[in-house]
Every structure is written in C-alpha cells, then in structure tokens.
Amino acid sequence: MPQKLQTIGFDADDTLWHNERFFHLTQEKFAELLREHTDVADLDGRLMAAERRNLGHYGFGVKGFTLSMIETAIEVTDGRVPSEVISQLLEAGREMLDHPMELLPHAREAVEALAGSHHLMLITKGDLLHQERKLAQSGLGDLFDGVEIVSDKVPETYTRIFSATPGGVSGAMMVGNSMKSDVRPAIEVGAWGVFVPHELSWDFEHAEAPDSARYHELPDLAGLSNLVANLD
C-alpha cells in the first residue's frame, strides 16, 4: 500500500538556514547612513513601500532589497543623498550576498531523517545565483530529489510542482516559516502545510493560520519526522 504522504517540500530561507537577520542588520545600517541626511522616523515604512512596489520588477532577494534601499534614499532626501552613501548601500548588498550560510538548529537532522523514505523538494524564491550558492554551501543539496527556485509562491506554483512528484498534490507537504508563501497556498491546492515560525519574519509574509485539518505547526524542525510518521 503506497504511503499517504510521499513528497515533502522544504522552504530554504529562515526554514533551513538564517536569512532575515541579515536584512534586519542591513536595514539598521541603512537608517544609520541616512540619519544625517533626513528624518528617519518613517524610514522603515518608506523602505517597505518601495520593496512592495518593486517586487514585480526585481523579485525577492538581496538585489531587489538593495535597489529599494537606494530608491528610498533618493526619495527621502529629495535627490540629495551623497554618492558615498549610495556606494555604501551597494557594498552592504554585496556583503549580504557574500555572507556565509548558517543552518538553523535541527535542519540537517530533519532533512536527513526523511531523505530515505520520502521524495524531498527544495522550493524557494529569490535570486537564482544567491539561492544556488547557499544550497551548495549548506551541504544538503544531495539529499533533495529536486530543487525549484521560483519567482513567487502562489497556489499555482504548488500545483505545478507537486503534480509532477510522487503522490501528486494530495500526497505532498510543504514545510516553511511563511504562512503566506509556504503554508496557505499549499493547503489551498490540497497539500499539507507545516508552519515552523522563525523569530524574525518579513512583514510581507504575515498571514492568518488556515482553518484546515491539513495544517500543522511545529516550534522547530526537531519534531518534523515524528509528525510525518504519524501522518504516514
């Protein structure tokens, strides 16, 4: 008799490895660089508005974030931002891209525990080269049966990916730290969704938990293999 659950998709950033904390640190540097040139009281809100506007142009990831910082710096200073500040923002973006990847607790153990019994997919959004580099540094690449680096995570994304995996959509699970991108759209198309919250999260990714029997929440990845065993 085939397994009830056959495919497990993992998000990458802030599910398997740290990511958002580097954005927070850079955003603090952004505010410090602009402190002498403008009122920073609503700087976070202005930057978030720029990021939202630019998602359709630049997508998710460090490069879009860096361009949004530069755009915001120009806007809030009415074009008077010094070229030196722009140069420092570009350097901050490069430092984010070059920062060593650091796995979250229990990430390796969770993936290794399921690799032999289930079809594993890495499903992440963001800059292609940056995500490929982080996956290579993680040492987890050989444990996944497939990798999908997508421009966005919407219901159609999971239908397309899981329809081509063992068990189809109904036999798939998505594990991630974003209720909006990982959990809700996967459940909407008929898969399971497992929310593993991270201490830091981007405001864009906030959403209400779904009212579904296919929804589960874990404090961290340590309990994932037991949850999967109970579903099987």
Image: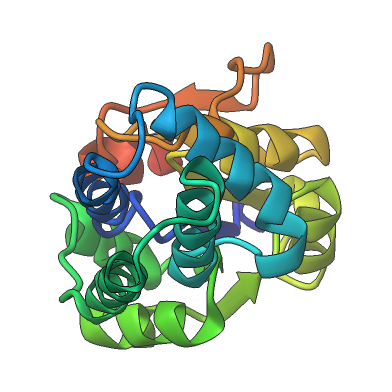
Q: Looking at the image, which residue is at 54% across and 26% down?
A: 206
Q: Looking at the image, which residue is at 81% across and 46% down?
A: 155
Identify whether 230 is placed above or below 133.
above
Identify whether 87 is placed above or below 114.
below
Quarter of the image that includes the N terminus = bottom right
Q: Residue 177, position in %: x, y?
A: 43, 39
| Residue 124: quarter of image | bottom right
Identify whether 83 is placed above or below 202.
below
Nearest the viewer among 72 and 12 is 72
Q: Residue 157, position in %: x, y?
A: 78, 59
Colour theme: rainbow
Q: Is residue 86 left or right of residue 58?
A: left
Nearest the viewer among 87 and 3 is 87
Identify whether 74 is placed above or below 202.
below
| Residue 42: quarter of image | top left
Q: Residue 182, position in %: x, y?
A: 58, 44
Q: Is residue 231 visible?
A: no
Q: Looking at the image, which residue is at 50% across and 41% down?
A: 76
Q: Residue 19, position in %: x, y?
A: 30, 56
Q: Is residue 209 left or right of residue 211?
A: left
Q: Is residue 171 visible?
A: yes
Q: Looking at the image, which residue is at 35% across and 75% down?
A: 90
